[in-house]
Image: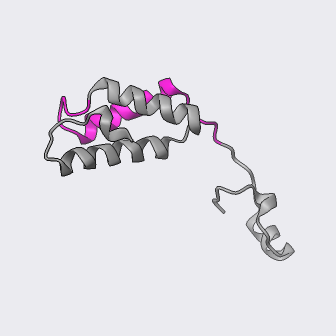
Amino acid sequence: MVSNQHPTTIELDPRSRSRLNCQTLEFNSYNAAQLEQILEKRVEQAFRPGSVPDSVITKIAEQVAENSGDCRQALSLLLQAARKAEQKGLTEVSEEFLT
C-alpha cells in the first residue's frame, strides 16, 4: 500500500493490515540545491531555452526548501508561474509570477 500517511494512522481491520503487510519507507525532504537541480532539468526538458531565468528557479527552490522540501510543490509553482506568463502573452517567466 502506498500512502502519505504513516501506517499507524490508517485504520484497518487486523485481517487487512496483515494482508497488506504495511512497511514504512520515508523520503527525506529535498534541500534547495537538490530542488534547483531537479527544476533545471525540468526546465531544460519542458521549456524553450531562455524562457525561465535562473533567478526564478533559485527562488522557487529556496522557497520550497524552506517550507516543505516537497519536489511536487516546486514543480507545481514552476508550472503555475509559466501559465501566468503565458496568459499575459509573455515568452519569459519572471519572479513576479511566483506569488
Corner quadrant of residue 11:
bottom right
Residue 3 seen by the camera: yes
Q: Is residue 12 left or right of residue 67?
A: right
| Residue at x 45% of width, y 31% of height | 61
Q: Position of residue 81 (x, y in %)?
A: 31, 43
Q: Report x, y in % for residue 22.
A: 76, 60
What residue is at 69 percent from the left and 47 percent from the top? 25
- Where's the C terminus, which quadrant? top left
Residue 37 at least partly seen: no
Image quadrant holding the N terminus, namely bottom right
What span is in magenta? Answer: 27-52
Foreground residue among 97 and 41: 97
Above or below, 7 against 70 in this view is: below
Residue 87 is left or right of residue 63, and the answer is left
As for residue 47 lying within the magenta part, the answer is: yes
In front here: 68 or 42? Answer: 68
Left or right: where 82 falls relative to 26: left
Q: Quadrant of residue 60?
A: top left
Residue 47, x across and y down, in percent: 22, 39
